Amino acid sequence: MGLVILNFKAYEEATGSKAEELSKICKETAEATGARIIVAPQTADILRTSPLIETIAQSASSIKPGSGTGSNLVESLKQAGAVGSILNHSEHRIPHMQISETVLRLKEAGMISVVCAQDDEEAKALAEFAPDYIAVEPPELIGSGVSVSQSKPEVVTKTVENIKQVNPDVKVLCGAGISNGSDVKKALELGVDGVLLASAFTKAADPRAVLLDICGGL
Ligand code: G3P
């Protein structure tokens, strides 16, 4: 069964006590459907969500313990309960050298890395760093409600092909505009291992119903 990663971004609807409420919905939906659901809340909310549902950070830093004000130290994220981190999201891009270093830091800590790519070419370059997952997300579709799997299937299939050529162990996700079960079903048909999404769930009037529908596509 595929994986669903829910990025809480900095949405008001998914911050603080609301991040906790959404995580309870994720826990109950995961139990009811058998789906693997992971949430990526704001760093300050990791302590709230991690007892409920698998949690990853939105952007771990490459730095080692020491000076580095404002960083998200891997060890700190781990102690807060995170099991991994997203890296290089379109809304928080970092240099490729830094991605490579952070993937290694996460590996050493026994944590998973979910590295975002804007297209199939970037995905190919990032596969060299051997992260656990690469998520392709065309920036223009993020938050649009228009699913990458339905509107740009060729980007998804090319990404899968490119990544598997470089490193068949890297799992592939797609995201941007994924809104319902049929978007997810289509994504899996294109060869990905799961999806990454945000607004369709966090901003829904009935997030539980949306998540159930999404998991129905796995
Ligand atoms: O990280 C997932 C995200 O960038 C996609 O956002 O709102 O289009 O699901 P959204």
Image: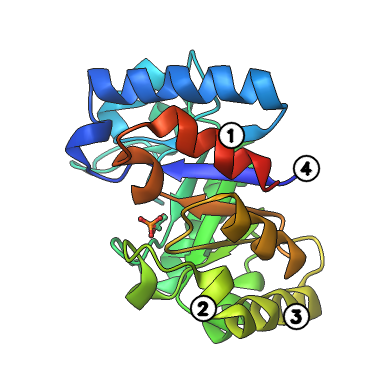
Label 1 sits on a secondary structure element that is strand
Q: Residue at x 51, y 80 (%)?
A: 119
Distance from Cα at disc 4 to Cα at disc 3: 20 Å
First in sequence: mark 1 vs mark 3: 1
The residue type indicated by label 4 comes to Met
Which residue is denoted by mark 2 in the rendering? Answer: 151
Label 4 sits on a secondary structure element that is loop
Q: Is residue 217 left or right of residue 106?
A: right
Q: Residue at x 78, y 74 (%)?
A: 164
Ligand 1's image quarter is bottom left
First in sequence: mark 3 vs mark 2: 2
- Residue 167 point in image, percent of width and height: 77, 70
- Residue 216 point in image, percent of width and height: 66, 41
Badge number at residue 153: none
Q: Is mark 2 within 8 Å of ligand 1?
A: no
Badge number at residue 37: 1
Quadrant in which residue 176 is drawn:
bottom left
Which residue is denoted by mark 4 in the rendering? Answer: 1
The residue type indicated by label 3 comes to Glu
Q: Quadrant of the N terminus?
A: top right
